[in-house]
Image: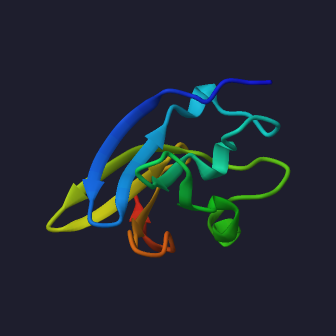
Amino acid sequence: MKCEPRVCEEYLTPFGRLVLFSYDETSEDGPVKPWENIQMLAKDGHAVWKVNGMEKSRYGWSAASPDTFVMLYSRDGNFYANTFGGYIFKIDIETGKTFYHGFGK
């Protein structure tokens, strides 16, 4: 059984702890998938929701070579995540849904 990856970024929100797990410690068969390494955790530690990066395949993600999140940050009361491939997504912290915001490397 694989260990849960370390938390790289963490924010306390009204909905729980918004965390970014270290992408280089995730795996397809581990407890945290590379494309789901941003999660909202409840007080007891269970995942309330996971960002599903595979839903954004039209921006270069594919099942054969999925991207992963490498940065999580807050700006002007909103949360954003950057992928290894350079895509930027705005995150709805209540639902975990993501919205394409731009590209930047």
Q: Relative to 90, is 44 above or below?
A: above
* Relative image position of residue 34 (x, y in whole percent): 66, 42
User: Which sits in the foreground, 67 or 77?
Assistant: 77
Q: How is the image coloured?
A: rainbow
Q: Relative to 83, is 4 above or below?
A: above
* Relative image position of residue 97 (x, y in whole percent): 51, 74
Residue at 27% from the left image edge and 60% from the top image edge: 13
Residue at 70% from the left image edge and 58% from the top image edge: 61
* Relative image position of residue 95 (x, y in whole percent): 48, 75
User: Which sits in the foreground, 37 or 61?
Assistant: 37
* Total labels drawn: 0
Q: Is residue 105 visible?
A: no
Give the residue at the far left of this rendering. Answer: 76
Residue 26: which quarter of the image? top right
Going by the image, does 20 lie left or right of 17?
Answer: right
Residue 31: which quarter of the image? top right
Q: Relative to 2, is 54 above or below?
A: below
Going by the image, does 53 lie left or right of 100?
Answer: right
Going by the image, does 12 lie left or right of 80?
Answer: left
Question: Which image quarter is the N terminus in?
Answer: top right
Give the residue at the far front of this rendering. Answer: 44
User: Which sits in the foreground, 62 or 55?
Assistant: 55
Q: Is residue 80 visible?
A: yes
Q: Relative to 72, is 5 above or below?
A: above
* Relative image position of residue 33 (x, y in whole percent): 69, 44
